[in-house]
Image (cartoon, grey):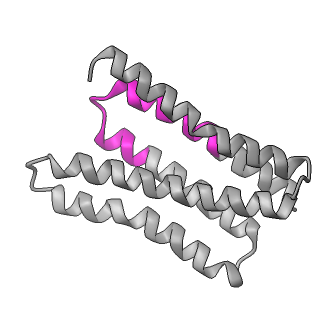
Amino acid sequence: MNEQQQQFAQRLGFAGLVPFLLLALAGLLDVYGATAIQWFIYYSVAIISFLAGVHWGLQMVQPSAATNRRLGWCMVPPVLAFAALAASVWLSSLAILAWLAVLHLFWLNYERRHLAEHEWYLAMRGQLTFTVVALHIILLIISL
């Protein structure tokens, strides 16, 4: 990927923070607070699933013996995120927000172990994940 493509990918990545920021702000200001937090949770699950797709695609082009195992690991976070949504009848928004924050951190850790050759991507993902997890924590605190 050339530098221009990397910069474009970074702009798209940071643009993906806009819904997180707007929904967290709506939750903080109590502008449709409960609905904003619920939409924040939905968007968080969507992003976790998006990251699974990114990793699935990366593994599809790897002729490695570990590919099957890594493909399997790519499915774990979105399935767990969906399970949190499905369990929302029993779980509070607090529990779901905490669980999703952990899943975002899982992805970052996974990427750092398996994508070391993409330094620019890891730097961007570190910033994005820090922001997303911080917003999850802020919503957790105001929901107490």
Residue 3 lies in the magenta stretch? no
Q: Quadrant of the C terminus?
A: bottom right
Which residue appears at 74% of the width and 50% of the height? 137
Which residue appears at 24% of the width and 46% of the height? 58
Which residue appears at 60% of the width and 73% of the height? 85
Residue 110 lies in the magenta stretch? yes
- In percent of width and height, residue 3 lies at 33, 15
The image shows a total of numbered marks equal to: 0
Q: Quadrant of residue 18?
A: top right
- In percent of width and height, residue 119 lies at 36, 25
Image-based side of 68 in relation to 116, left or right: left
Image-based side of 40 in relation to 138, left or right: left
- In percent of width and height, residue 71 lies at 25, 60
10 relative to 48, above or below = above
85 relative to 40, above or below = below
Q: Which residues are magenta?
A: 109-132
The secondary structure that most of the magenta stretch takes on is helix
Image-based side of 37 in relation to 100, left or right: right
